[in-house]
């Protein structure tokens, strides 16, 4: 019924927790495909031990070449046999009913794409937050989508890993991950969205996202943080090549501005000790090149929060002040989590 694909790279510290949550799923017709992406720790040995115990549930792909998450997921997709495909990160874990509930919802609604909410957790398994979500997802859940609703879904959907995807659409429409690059999931999810007929949503947190400060996307002062810019440009290329660009232009534009510009500005100030101010100037210029009139987009005032608009003004005119505000926010967040750990 569901094939769960787990890319693995040096995850020995958290991997058993992830695997236990998958092999004990209440959905019995499930396969779990682990793609070892040239790990140098004991990750592969841990997976092999679980396979001995669950030989019918677990498949192992041992890549001889490092492909990063996108390439590893592609290897998993190509051997998957499930009606639906799901993706779990190796340092996260899931509710034991997650895939039973998502699959049941998919069959009930005859849906191509089913999502749920998720928790954010720290290293002590403390729940830091429950993700926010757009009420629009509940409004369209189980309906056949028109173009306007698909356009809104582009900037309303949540993360890659709290969904299941119909495998036949992935193959029929040739939707695979960009390889050897970070933030590749943004490309996959958005392209897939524009090919579906129905989206369904469960207002239940079933996925536990571990905020691993040592993960690829959390490391400080790394230039691959700017991979997200390349991914956004590749999305535009793909939309044009697949004749989606004009059809969903307003949604594509606002999703691009949020991901390419607003979110990247936040990452720059959160991830770099000395923020690369020139990069921010370049971001502004590139946004103007792609979408010079984005502030006239009908979605701009509707879905861009006032606080994000203020951040853009500060980034463009007072970047050092914005940097100080982000540093203060990080300090407050860290202090709050310390209190939670002490309490527990």
Image (tube, helix red, strand yellow):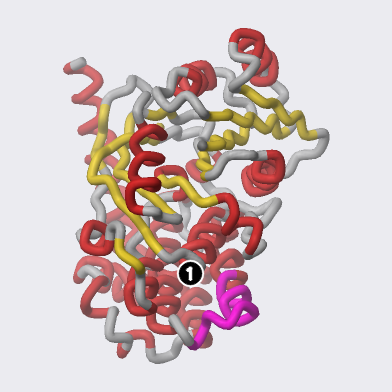
Residue beneath the point at 63% across and 43% down: 69
Q: Nearer the viewer, residue 251 or 222?
A: 251
93, 114: nearer the viewer? 114
Question: Residue shown at 27%/46% (left/top)?
Answer: 202
Q: Is residue 63 left or right of residue 212?
A: right
Q: Which range of residues does the magenta coloring cover?
A: 235-246
Residue with the mark numbered 1: 194
Residue at image position (50%, 58%) is: 189
Residue 302 against residue 220 in the figure, above or below: below
> Residue 138 lies in what quarter of the image?
bottom left
Residue 75 location, x and y as percent? 71, 42
Query: Does the stretch in magenta take in 241?
Result: yes
What residue sits 30% from the left and 64% below the top? Answer: 143
Regarding residue 177, the answer to whether it shows in the image is yes
Local packing at callout 1 (Cα closer than 10 Å; few below 14, some 14-19, many 20+) is: some
Quarter of the image for residue 34 reads top right
Q: Is residue 198 magenta?
A: no
- Residue 117, percent from left and from top: 30, 44
Task: Examine the rendered structure and indicate whether residue 310 appears above or below residue 37.
Answer: below
Residue 14 in sight here: no
**Which residue appears farthest toward the right when viewing the image?**
64
Q: Could you say whether the residue bearing mark 1 is in a helix, strand or loop?
A: loop
Marker count (numbered): 1
The answer to whether residue 128 is left or right of residue 54 is left
Q: In which quadrant will I find the C terminus?
A: top left
| Residue 184 drawn at (x, y percent) | 58, 55
For residue 314, which quarter of the picture?
A: bottom left
């Amino acid at each position: 019924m569901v094939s769960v694909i787990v890319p693995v790279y040096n995850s020995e510290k958290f991997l058993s927790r992830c695997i236990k949550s998958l092999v004990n799923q209440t959905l019995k017709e499930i396969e779990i495909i682990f793609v070892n992406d040239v790990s140098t720790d004991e990750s592969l040995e841990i997976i092999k031990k679980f396979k001995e115990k669950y030989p019918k549930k677990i498949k192992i792909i041992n890549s001889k070449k490092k492909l990063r998450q996108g390439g590893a997921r592609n290897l998993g997709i190509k051997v998957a046999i499930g009606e639906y495909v799901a993706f779990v990160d190796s340092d996260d874990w899931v509710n034991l009913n997650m895939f039973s509930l998502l699959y049941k919802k998919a069959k009930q609604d005859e849906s191509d794409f089913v999502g749920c909410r998720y928790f954010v957790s720290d290293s002590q398994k403390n729940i830091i937050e429950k993700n926010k979500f757009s009420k629009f997802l509940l409004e369209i859940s189980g309906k056949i989508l028109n173009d306007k609703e698909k356009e809104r879904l582009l900037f309303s959907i949540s993360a890659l890993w709290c969904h299941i995807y119909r495998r036949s659409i992935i193959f029929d429409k040739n939707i695979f991950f960009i390889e050897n690059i970070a933030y590749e999931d943004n490309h996959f999810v958005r392209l897939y969205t524009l090919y579906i007929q129905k989206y369904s949503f469960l207002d239940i947190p079933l996925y536990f996202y571990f905020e691993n400060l040592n993960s690829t996307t959390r490391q400080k002062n790394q230039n691959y943080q700017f991979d997200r810019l390349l991914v956004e440009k590749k999305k535009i290329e793909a939309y044009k090549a697949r004749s989606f660009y004009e059809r969903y232009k307003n949604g594509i534009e606002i999703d691009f501005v949020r991901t390419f510009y607003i979110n990247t500005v936040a990452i720059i100030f959160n991830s770099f000790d000395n923020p690369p101010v020139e990069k921010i100037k370049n971001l502004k210029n590139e946004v103007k090149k792609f979408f010079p009139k984005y502030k006239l987009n009908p979605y701009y005032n509707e879905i861009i929060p006032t606080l994000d608009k203020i951040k853009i003004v500060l980034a463009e005119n007072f970047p050092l002040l914005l940097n100080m505000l982000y540093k203060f926010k990080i300090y407050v967040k860290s202090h709050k989590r310390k209190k939670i750990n002490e309490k527990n």
